[in-house]
Amino acid sequence: MEKYSRKVAKSKIKAICESQGKSIEVLSNKILEWKSEYLKGNIGKPYKTKTDVVNMVTEDIADELAISILFTTILLGKNTFQSYIGHVASQINLEIESFRKAQLAAWVLAYCDGGAYDIIAPAIGSMMNYSVEPKISLSVEDSQELSRCFFLPPSKDKLNDWTNPYNGGYSFERSYAILGDSFNKHDYPIDLKTLNILQSVKYKLTNNVDTPQKLDEEASDDRAVQFALAEIQTRKVLKDYRDDEFSFVWKFDKRGRVYSCGYDINVQGDSYRKASLEFAKEEIVNESGKRWLKIDIANHYGLDKELWEDRVKFVDKNDSILEALADKADEPLLYIQAVQAYRKAQKGLPTGYIVRLDATASGPQIMNILFRDLVGMRYLNVRGDDTRHDLYTLVAQTMYENTKDSQIWRDLNDDFAKVRKVVKKPIMTSFYNSKSKPKEIFGEDTIELQEFYKALKKYCKGALEVQDTINACWDNSKDVNIWTLPDGHTAYCPVSKVLESKIEIPEKGMKITYTHTVQRANFAESRSLCPDCIGTIV
């Protein structure tokens, strides 16, 4: 497992660089030389904030910076100088704000120009950015393998329990229990027990991994190239884990939702990755379990908008030919896995298959419940009746009936499937407080826009009321919003702002504009409060 770690990756980088005459020690000494020259006053005019940062660069930090620079050079290849700054800055382990890390990265990168890479100035008047061209070459396979240290696979060994926010997960790597920027770190209670429960669950790979993943035929040439390169490493990881049990490291996002870590193998990945996973501990399935397997088969076939009993009947009716229907399924890989699990259950054999269910427009569904909107709860399938309602279809039908003469629908040849698809996007984004998407689709101050909001209010009146109530709680003076979940976990949502700042780089006589994110109170982020609050519940 440790072979995928950053420690091993750094050892490999060292070996690659030294084989090509690019010593980490030489680069580290160059960084210490930069520190000395600056403090002597030989690099631009010293000032306090820069001096404070420079004085933090010890021999150990210089070594780490050297490795980070070489790592970045190998991974990014030819790229913009700004990209290099961001990548190196993300690896700097100093207790300073993110912009100071970017400045440090820029200064050091500029001073070390000509060693492992060349910084190329743009042509005068071209409006282009400075770029970096590496002098280190490595194979595509090595590049893919090194990049995986940012997306560690699951662990075959027992993971460390989280007893504080820093010590859980992989034994060889220290990381924080909450994903995202350093802004997300805090001292409030975190529900570490849930992370420990999740990472105690063992998984194994299914026979789906024996067949390589296929790329969508409509994918662009660039996407095809990226996919082919990534697939090289994915196959290596899958082969390594083919016959073993393993468990995932789990972490929270700032809202309190949990995510499994990893790329090649992931609980929350695409259909291929989901079809490649099952529980290591198999169980005999009872009659209730068989019913849910039938529902799962029907869902993957494409009947996820039918009533539960109609989905069960579909499987009962087609029991003898389920395998033959795989080519017609919406999700063939997941459908095949579900059918195989069902066959095992029919024979009384244990299975580790994972049944998955998707919610019905979960955001507005939960919001209607919070408001006790009985009408909205019925149309979002909370109360239950003899119809499996679909919010997107309901809003599209209502809107279409009241705007049949619209040019928007005529351009779609009045094909209702296309009408529903057009209407779905603004519905989804509306509950993320988006006003621009509905206007983009239906125009500003148009009949279509008015009818869209009327239809939305008909089925989601309570949800819209909840949205307005939460939006009214926004405080322009706060740079973080904090609330406690029922299990005691803290949702800690910093308010961020994207800035463009100038970085003076006297080391190379440069001045660049650098885009970065800071934690800062601002009204522009007010739209995030409602989706963040609801996201903690969904």
Image (cartoon, rainbow, N blue to C red):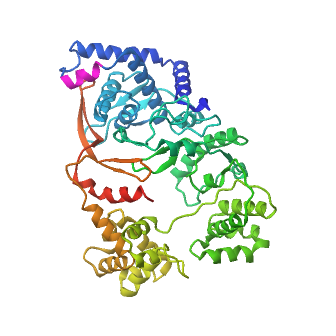
The quadrant in which the N terminus is found is: top right
Count of numbered circles on the image = 0
User: Does the magenta portion include 519?
Assistant: no
Could you say which is closer to the camera, residue 466 or residue 338?
466
Can residue 506 be seen in this snapshot? yes
- Compared to residue 242, the image places residue 408 above or below, namely below
- Percent x, y of residue 513: 26, 39
Q: Please say whether residue 262 is visible from this viewpoint.
A: no
- The residue that appears at 69% across and 49% down in the rendered structure is 209
Q: Which residues are magenta?
A: 48-55
- In this rendering, position of residue 256 left or right of residue 454: right
Rendered location of residue 122, percent (x, y): 31, 36
51 within the magenta span = yes
Residues 375 and 412: in front is: 375
- Quadrant assignment, res 406: bottom left
In terms of depth relative to the viewer, which is nearer, 234 or 132?
234
Q: Main secondary structure of the magenta part?
A: helix
Quadrant position of residue 431: bottom left
Q: Is residue 120 above or below residue 311?
A: above
* Location of residue 303 in the rendering, given as x and y in whole percent from the top left corner: 61, 73
Q: In the picture shown, does residue 105 fall above or below 468? A: above
